[in-house]
Image (cartoon, coloured by chain):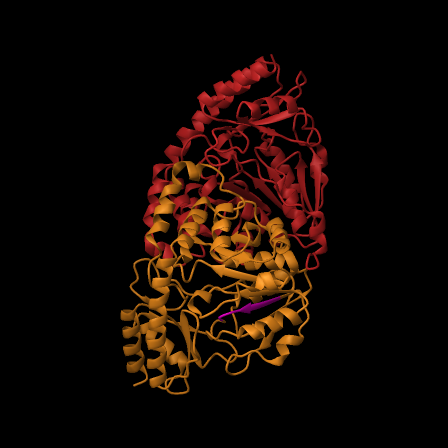
Chain colours: A orange, B red
Amino acid sequence: MKYQREILKQVSGYVPGEQPKPGERIIKLNTNENPYPPSPRVMEAIAAVGADGLRRYPDPNAVELRKTAAELYGFAGPEWVIAGNGSDELLAMIIRTFVDPGETVWSAYPTYSLYDTLVKLHGAKYASVDLDREFRMTPEFFTRQGRVFFLARPNAPSGVSSPKAEVEKLCKSFPGVVVIDEAYADFDEDDCMDFPRRFENAIVTRTFSKSYSLCGLRAGLAFARPEIIAELMKTKDSYNMSAVSQAGATAALRDQAHMRANRDKVIATRARLTRALREMGFTVPDSKGNYVLARWGGRPDTKGIFTGLRERKIVVRYFDARNLTDALRISIGTDAETDTLLAAIREIVK
Amino acid sequence: MKYQREILKQVSGYVPGEQPKPGERIIKLNTNENPYPPSPRVMEAIAAVGADGLRRYPDPNAVELRKTAAELYGFAGPEWVIAGNGSDELLAMIIRTFVDPGETVWSAYPTYSLYDTLVKLHGAKYASVDLDREFRMTPEFFTRQGRVFFLARPNAPSGVSSPKAEVEKLCKSFPGVVVIDEAYADFDEDDCMDFPRRFENAIVTRTFSKSYSLCGLRAGLAFARPEIIAELMKTKDSYNMSAVSQAGATAALRDQAHMRANRDKVIATRARLTRALREMGFTVPDSKGNYVLARWGGRPDTKGIFTGLRERKIVVRYFDARNLTDALRISIGTDAETDTLLAAIREIVK
């Protein structure tokens, strides 16, 4: 294709997890969606946008949403927050804002594979440091040089959350911007929301897709010092968030009780699933996300279990990737879905 | 700011048109919004997304919307179409897909100022060819070399629509991709939707913000040959359009009667406003958009008229830019808003 850029010849783009066809009855445990519905206030807020809110341009600066987020998390004002069309957009914006093509961006291995894709699309170099067998950071993490370091906490697909002291060490040792991707932090026991105040190079990102059950709305937030946020505001699409996403996300933040109730159910099911899988002989690290990574050394292999589950209309995530072929990532579903899953696995592994 | 990229030091970002504060009663004729509400089917479709549609990831490929658009415009299938979070996102994606940093992107002057901003944010060079005093293309347009040429048709802020034969000449002479930005084409008498079939380098972009009254939803489309679309699909954010935007935009396309009725009202008011302004002594090129550019050589000057209107709570667009300081761009409002506007201008110019 003669109009193509050279750098895009090597890039294939991100491959999102499988989505069921409309009408297909499936237990979907492959993309870490929340099994419980979003707050009813979100649907009310979306309906309230109405004809006039749709007709007019949305607030390009999403001030109401950013103010609500700043208050909720104890930041001085909206200048500490930026809102995006999903946290994926914010990750892409961070690369465009802080990385010149040709420069290096770091992350852990294994982790969220979108970082790699976004860095390559930008014409920058992606590099990663291996986590150890228990998915812990190694001394290697604290000697890297580059413009941006992406650290998912809790990490995916392991569910392991690096100790805050280690993340602090990373912020101090890394010369560029450290992005702490807290997509799953609401399912964790602590978070790094104090880091933007403490470190000039820390950005914390959050999504509405997981704990708020709003994958379909596309909304995310990033928190950092006002100088960092101002720089990101320059590079964002001027009207990057629809009036609907702004209204829905604001309503979601204002209903913390709803989010916490769903979160608590997910955490309880996660504990039960982890226990049951371990009893069957899987190795399962303690997960702080809404998913578990289940390692398996028995028969059939994980590919076989994956296929067996697929035949029973249960979809989990199998990774054809280094150090992960012996593992399945399973999203936390409802209790009933989890019972069906466990029964199916028992059947498959005999 | 030590983490900043060198290229961002010179960029200030796009400045969107002024938005009224909540509750402020104003006649808003500055951002080319449609004065009439979107189709009621859009609101129904948005409500129908529901808790489950919000909880799940949206279709990353927006297949339903792209199929609907392909059918409506007579393309063979969805592989001729890509959907974006507003056509602004598509313009940015086109630059990222077809332009290496340092290379040149062309456009006309004057035109939509976002092109300039997006090109600079990408670290590429922005260059423009002056339109003549009647906003027509000159022979200079057909000798340019570069990766992308943005041509808004109808153009903003003039409302002038270049003859299709000239756009064809541009597609043939320009060695890179020619983007025909048809944000306002529904208000025009013809369009270039046949160009993607005829020219391998033509991309036509459309928005839902103008004729469909959906600025707040953020939805846009681009049409081009499948090879071009495939390349754009690589660089787009994986879930760039919310389930809500996809559903709303699809419903809007399916209610052509609603769009046409609003469009016809806007065109009738445009004719009346043009006539009245000319009678007062303004020079107004025939506009094919939902706005007119009114040039003025009298007293007070256009800045004075702009300020006088602002005092009367009417906002139009004044451009502090070369060749445009003697002009105001006025969006087409309702008939009542237009009457109020005309009375106010008469008062201001005595």
* Quarter where residue B311 is shown: top right
Determine the residue positioned at 39% across, 44% down: B248
* Quarter where residue A141 is shown: bottom right
Tell which of B99 and A213 is nearer to you. A213
On screen, residue B69 above or below B312: below
Tell which of A121 and B75 is nearer to you. A121
One can see residue A182 in this view: yes
Q: Tell me: A131 left or right of A147.
A: left
Q: Give the image location of residue A1, x and y in percent.
A: 60, 56
One can see residue A5 in this view: no
Q: Tell me: B314 left or right of B136.
A: left
Tell which of B199 and A55 is nearer to you. A55
Tell which of B75 and A231 is nearer to you. A231
On screen, residue B128 above or below A83: above
Q: Give the image location of residue B155, x and y in percent.
A: 59, 33
Q: Is residue A69 magenta?
A: no
Q: Which residues are magenta?
A: A149-154
Determine the residue positioned at 67% across, 20% down: B301
